Amino acid sequence: MKTKAFLFSVIIAISFACMIPGLALSQSTDTDTSSPNSANLNVSLVSQNPDPAKSGDMVELRFMIENTGGRPTSDLKFELLVEYPFTEIPGEEYIKTVSALKAYQQGADAITIKFKVRVDKDAIKGSNQIKLKRSEVGMDYAVIQSFVVDVTGSEYAQIIYVDKSILSPGEETPLKFTITNVGTSPLQNLVFSWNEKNGVILPVYSDDTKYIKYIDVGESTDVEYTVVADVNTDPGLYQLDLTLKFDAESGVSQEMNTKAGIFVGGATDFDVTFSESTAGQTSLSVANIGNNPALSVTVRIPEQENFAVSGSTSSIIGNLDKGDYTIVSFQISQTMAGGRMNRTIGQTPTASQSNLKVQIEYTDTTGKRYTLEKSVSIQFRSTDSATTGQTTTGFRQQSNPLANYLPYILVAALIAAGLVCYRKRSYLRTHLGRRSKKGKA
């Protein structure tokens, strides 16, 4: 009985020992352990470019395929499962095939496959997983492996706004630049500067460099200057070279260079004064008192109470440089307002009656057309008003052709009166003398 039990135990032990190699073989097919009797695949992510990948940018992933087993394999398919925060790139293929792998094909002999994906612009900084599915033709199962891709935010700043496009020469003008972090990583230790190579535009009260400590994602900051454009410069568009240096959160320093245009020139101003009034012509002095030339200047007398223009109401001057002046003349007379005489002879006109409205139309150096209205104090002479048929009193007076001969008439009248008196006295003397002689006789 004991002998049978012992033999039974030996048979069971031998059977168990015979089962162990089969069990070991079954486990080796599910692992990457080298086996002389099977193909064992080992897939690894060997590189990513760039590393770390930047949000919003493209990244290339390289996978290495090794066979660590002693049996060859064939017809392998690898599919990259593209999920957020990664997106597919149009035209790229995301299924790769490997026709065959030899036994122990590994290391330098391994096969490399690569995929390109784009990192979402809002990807979270840090480690992000991407999955690769592998399958073998003729097998009804697939293996999915996860790999870690390091992602960092994009460091990008943009000077998106300059608040001035036109500077008037010689005038202090505030100039503001707005800098915005349009990337996905904070920016720090920013240094902003600008330069105009001809020295036409220069900052005052400070230099051209400003320091900014920190700008968070999506935030903006303003950099302000006070600038002056050279008063003697020619009108035109001038280029500002803008430079922004900053440190990314990773500690890497970057520099951005861009350009902006500033127009120097623009509008101007005029001074209009009364020059003289003779022979029915009223002359006005028009001076460009601004810092910019005026183009296509026209002086116009608009319709208004108290004044009337005979003939043309406008005079074309042409171009008038800064500091220059010219004289324009019009046939201007004072009129009755409201059907009644403005004033009588000897009265002084009121300010509203003696101020003439004058319009200056011109084109500035940017091509914009302006109309300015000025008020000019006018002084008429009586002789001028008589010549134009208007008196300084504001009513019409008919001229007398005998007025020019009045002095001669008065002299003739005096002579005639003298002759009459002389003859009368002579007659009386003669008549009285004869009567006295008769009486004595």
Image (spheres, rainbow, N blue to C red):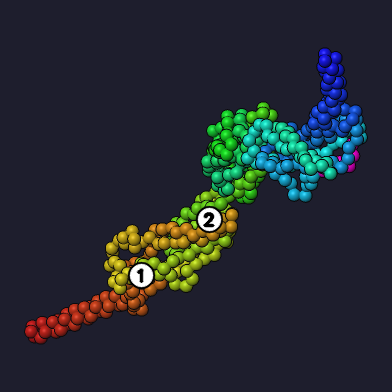
Task: Name which residue lies at 74% across and 37% down.
Answer: 144
Task: Determine if residue 412 is in view.
Answer: yes
**Relative to 283, residue 30 above or below:** above
**Residue 397 location (% of width, % of height):** 33, 74
Within-10-Å neighbours for mark 1: few <14, some 14–19, many 20+: many
Task: Name which residue lies at 36% across and 61% down.
Answer: 354
Q: Quadrant of residue 440?
A: bottom left
**Residue 342 location (% of width, % of height):** 30, 67
Callout 1: helix, strand or loop?
Answer: loop
**Relative to 2, residue 59 above or below:** below
Q: Is residue 45 left or right of residue 312?
A: right
Labelled disc at residue 335 = 1
Q: Is residue 217 left or right of residue 26?
A: left
Labelled disc at residue 325 = 2
Q: Observer-nearest residue: 428 or 399?
A: 399
N-term mark: 2 or 1: 2
Labelled disc at residue 361 = none
Image quadrant occupied by the N terminus: top right
**Residue 21 location (% of width, % of height):** 86, 25
Task: Determine if residue 13 is in view.
Answer: no
Image quadrant occupied by the C terminus: bottom left
Type of the residue with mark 1:
Thr
Q: Main secondary structure of the magenta part?
A: strand
Task: Name which residue lies at 54% across and 33% down.
Answer: 205
Q: Which residues are magenta?
A: 96-101
Task: Name which residue lies at 89% across and 30% down.
Answer: 37
Q: Observer-nearest residue: 358 or 211?
A: 211
Q: Observer-nearest residue: 97 or 437?
A: 97
Q: CA distance from mark 2 to mark 1?
A: 29 Å
CB contact under 8 Å: marks 2 and 1: no
Type of the residue with mark 2:
Tyr
